[in-house]
Image (spheres, rainbow, N blue to C red):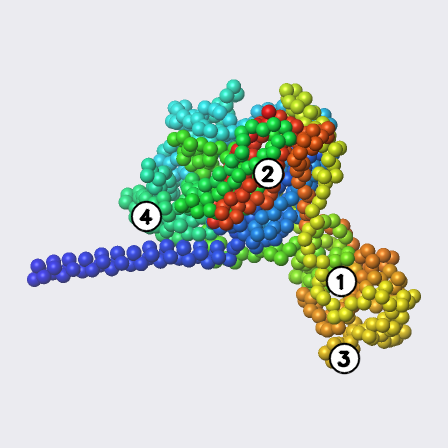
Amino acid sequence: MYQRYIVLRSLFLILTVVLVSGTQGYTQSNILNDLSRSFGQYNTSVLKEKVFLHTDRDSYIAGNTLWFKLYNTGTNNQLLTVSKVAYVEILNDSLKPVLQAKVEIKEGSGNGSFYLPVSLASGNYIIRAYTNWIKNFGSKSFFEKNITIINPLKGNPIAASEGPSVYNVQFFPEGGNLVNGISGRIAFKVSGPDGFGVNFRGAIIDQHNDTISRFKPLKFGIGSFEFTPKSGSSYKVVVIPANEKPVYTSLPEIFPEGFAINISTLNDGNVKIAVNTNIHSSDLYIVGHTSGQILVTEHILLQEGKGELIIKKEKLADGINSFTLFNDLKKPVCERLYFKYPENDVKLSATFNSATYARREKVRLEIAASGNGNKPLKSDLSLSIYRLNNTSQLRHSDIQSYIYLTSELKGTIEQPGSYFEEKGSQRQELVDNLMLTHGWRKFDWQSILLQQQSSFKYLPEYEGHIVRALVKNKLTNKPAENILAYLSIPGKSIQLYVSKTDSNGIASFNTKNFYGSNEVVVQTDPLSKDTYAIEVLSPFSNEHTPQTASLNNLKTIPDSIAKQLLSESLNMQVNNIFNGDKLRQISPPKVDSAAFFGKPNKRYLLDDYTRFTTVEEVLREYIPEIWLVKNEGKLNLSVIDQQTNNSFTSEPLMILDGVPVFHSEKLIRYDPLKIRSLDIINRRYYLGPAVFDGIVNFSTYNGDMKGFQLDDKAAVVDYEGLLAQRQFYLPQYMNEEQKNSPIPDFRDLLYWSPSIRTDESGKTSVEFYTSDQKGEYIGVLQGVTEKGNIINEKVKIAIK
């Protein structure tokens, strides 16, 4: 009997273990599936755009032209075709825009230029770029970089006042927190008064003045060390910069309990994740993701508060991978960024036909791009070739370091390109320290797990530039909702857009083919009993990130290069004198000049008919599609419907040079000798949210509404459309007469092209001529292949 009891008891225990194990496995699977599903659902609703700007150089003389190429990339770094407009600004040290432009994007890229006026003061400036959609995610998502503009004509900049040395000492526990009794890694960053990392010696001292740990930076004031906080101990930190007084600070808060995570790279390239906790827990979960994609979901079984797992390197994406540690309640408890160096399988060859050249000699550069198996790759590239000097040093600002590093991290990263140039054994340690000091960002898992729907204020401009106007009721000063508003761009090309205001009183007009500076007219129907105030809103952002606000002033220009700057300024002025017209040439945009309504049903050129002295006579005598009826002493105009051959009961949309006119008597009183043509649409016409009983379009000879008085309720403002393209001037020296021309050629920017594309063969070539300026020149070639490979290549030539 006793033996039978023992057997039954053993079977019961075994069954219990099996059931509990099965339940735990089911729970673990559920939690990982829930995390993956929530993450996937959240990210499918959020489009990711990332803008990079390639400028021809990083430092300029006032009076020069700054050229740029813009790349808009998405997942897998491939060019995106969603947004059709980008916004580019240059900000001064007060964060005020000194130059702004709206840049057209085609097939994921665009280009433009800024003339840098001689009124600009010497100093450091920020150039930044973003799309309307990117504004939804704040200025931290904008592209930003420093450029230097020097104006020798305005004298030497004044040095910043020398104040007390202030050092910023920061500590970053791996995973987020220091936990009592748990060994962890602490990263640190120490920067000087100028914001750049400094060299120093540091130590941690306990309450007994015993030195617990010593540390020093590996590079750029950044490094890390191991540390175990002990219960009952207190700590202070001393940092001693070179030739400076000690700086005393403290460690981050030490928590009595919590979790710690450590991520390291093994010799075979795989990644080891180790976790440690003093909280009673048996199950933890790791989720790895990047660019809206889940890469890794793993369960970690703890034994005595410790656990680890190995992640195969093949599972990780190139660039930054985010790892989040969850407890069994699906609560994120640790976060860590890990960087995997890109396995860039693109091969780019950029070869000059010679290493050295004489003045005014022809240069040829052969370019070829290929992928795995030497398969040719199509690519979209930009190329700048300029003279190296003391004011144009390489700043390590390139598309590779931006796409993979700076766009994904917080704060300003010093020389980001150097992390890719590093080839030694410290390479992974350097970038690991960078992840620890710039990567703690607390990913918003709460919104994801709760499936909170994101609300977006700004729409992607997938058709063209969106002009926004705020409409308010003048009596109540409140936003006017559900009001029809009209945007017109007066001119020979008839552009009219109609929008209905939203709950915030905003009317959004999706414009097309709107280039250059022009007047725009925004109005509501003046026949309405209510009156409205209209304000055309700027599409540029006035938001700034902390790193933008920390822009440093340019210090005094050393005397050693003052003469060189003056010489470069004189060379620039000589070029402007002799080649000013060629340097200022604008390429006319290729646009469809047809009116928004397309081909009219009938067009009348009034010079083909007898010229009458009143518009009424013109309409009565030879415009059979229009019917004039006098009502209460006023002439009303209607169009004959082509389908019913009866006149519409309401007046048509009446336009003069693209601007709606709501009072027919104003058009009837207009001088007909100023009207060149008359277009008739004699059918019902739908334009956005509006419906019109036909259209009558009057066009003057110059498209300027000459002599016509607009309604005083209309808002007329000067507005910049899309940036017109300036042509890059390339002189030709194809014969001896041209080579021996006495006109000086003092160009130090030999070549710029934003539109270099390798074809199906993966190849292309460029040609240009050298100038009269001897010296060493560098060529910077950047871009993206159709597969999303990043291209960043530098080549050099010399002019003897």
Image check: 406 left or right of 67? left
Say which label, 4 or 1, has the lower sequence index: 4
Q: CA distance from mark 4 to mark 2?
A: 59 Å
The secondary element bearing badge 3 is classed as: loop
| Residue annotated with mark 3 | 645
Q: Is residue 563 depicted above or below 367 in this figure?
A: above
Q: CA distance from mark 3 to mark 1?
A: 31 Å
Say which label, 3 or 4, has the lower sequence index: 4
Question: What amino acid type is highlighted by mark number 1?
Answer: Thr
Front residue of 446/619: it is 619
Say which label, 2 or 1, has the lower sequence index: 1
Q: Position of residue 715 (x, y in %)?
A: 78, 56
| Residue annotated with mark 1 | 524
Q: Residues within 10 Å of mark 1 (few under 14, many from 20)?
A: many
Q: Residues within 10 Å of mark 4 (few under 14, many from 20)?
A: many
Question: What amino acid type is highlighted by mark number 3?
Answer: Asn
| Residue annotated with mark 4 | 300
